[in-house]
Image (tube, helix red, strand yellow):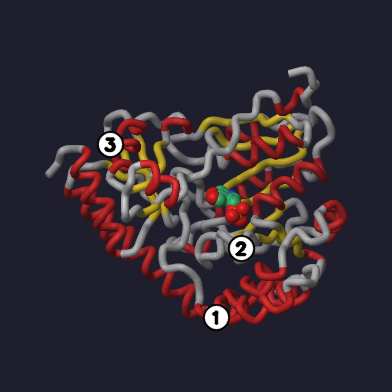
Amino acid sequence: MKFQINRYIESIKAYEPGRPLKEVARQYQLEKVIKLASNENPLGFSPKVDDAVQKAMKEMNRYPESAAHALNNELSKRFSVSSENIVLGNGSDDIIALLCHGFLNEGDEALMPLPSFLMYEISVKTAKGVPVMVPLNDFSTNLQGLVEKITSKTRLIFITNPFNPTGSTIDVDEFNDFAQKVPADVIIVVDEAYIEFVRSDQVYNSLKNPLYDPRVVSLRTFSKAYGLAGFRVGYGIMDVQIAGILNKIRQPFNVNSLAQVAAVAALEDESFLNKSIKSTHESLDFMFKELKAMGIEVLPTQSNFFMLDIKSDAKKIFQQMLQLGVIVRSMESYGFDTFLRVNTGTKKENMAFLKALKTVLKKV
Ligand SMILES: Cc1ncc(COP(=O)(O)O)c(C=O)c1O
């Protein structure tokens, strides 16, 4: 190529999303395809979201409200924070990128587990920063390993709790011990995309155990438990000064009008949220029981997904499952060559997944 590209992004591997349903149906000429690959909510979203969005459609000739007052107010009441502590994003992906652009100068370092949610690495590199990766310890975040990698160039540390892709978690005591060892000028980003699914009360929750710490940035999303992945809306709760920087550099209309009303309506419908969480837990219990009966090892999880060790080439099994109309994730690109990651589905989807897995593993 004759154009010179930013040398920091040369090594970026593009984010590979889960395969879309329609694409797989077309490729394999299938009538029915199920997707358990992107940790989405199989129950859809609250009917209240539907009503609110229908109404808001009439005003789509107008730009969105940049400050998203209604959503901001709702979140500030819920978490007892000022609206100045809140940053809204086009998904939490957006806030990850804003943090990197706001706080990394060229060559500054951001620490993260290896493997991690790929958007951390992509966003750090795009901001001309250097990702420093710390391998997992027995499928869990190596907090001591992260501390050991802190240098005078460290500006950000990404922690995911519960962790994607393994489903492991960090307990309150572990987090507090870790935070004590992190210098005062390093931002600790705690990505809690899956926190609503946690069942153990030992697990650290940055908005429930709020020993006020200006270094901690909590990231949340409406894409998972609330079922609004397609709307693209997430939020961060953080120190006023950090929020001020992000709000200054975000695109003025980064959360579109429909996403704003959808998120407010979703927050108002506690019963849909609870139904989704209950159904997720029931699905997990069912799937774990069935998989164990098949002799398959499953990693414990506090999330809406889990990893299973099929003791053979995960990429091959993933392909064979695709042909049967079941989309899961092969964990080979994360360095787990024999693992699949699967999220919970409806009862029917869970059964279809188990049936397809039995077929490809020849356990029928
Ligand atoms: C750990 C983690 N963080 C953030 C995100 C991004 O979520 P959003 O849809 O809010 O951009 C995901 C999505 O899969 C995720 O797994």
Amino acid on which the number 2 mark rests in the picture: Phe
Image quarter of residue 73: bottom right
- Gap between marks 2 and 3 measured at Cα: 34 Å
Residue bearing mark 3: 310
Q: Residue tagged by mark 2?
A: 231
Q: Work out whether residue 137 can be spotted.
A: yes
Measure the C-alpha gap from mark 1 to mark 2: 15 Å
Say if 336 sits above or below 74 in the image: above
Whole-percent x and y of residue 328? 38, 45
Kindly identify the residue that appears in the image at 75 percent across and 64 percent down: 86
Left or right: where does residue 245 sit relative to residue 117? right
- Residue at image position (78%, 31%) is 128
**In the structure shown, which secondary structural element does the residue marked by tag 3 occupy?**
loop
Q: Residues within 10 Å of mark 3 (few under 14, many from 20)?
A: some
The picture places residue 323, in percent across and down from the top left corner, at: 30, 41
Q: Earlier in the sequence, mark 1 or mark 2?
A: 1
Type of amino acid at the residue the image marks with label 1: Lys
Q: Quadrant of the C terminus?
A: top left
Q: Report the Cα–Cα distance between label 1 and label 3.
A: 40 Å
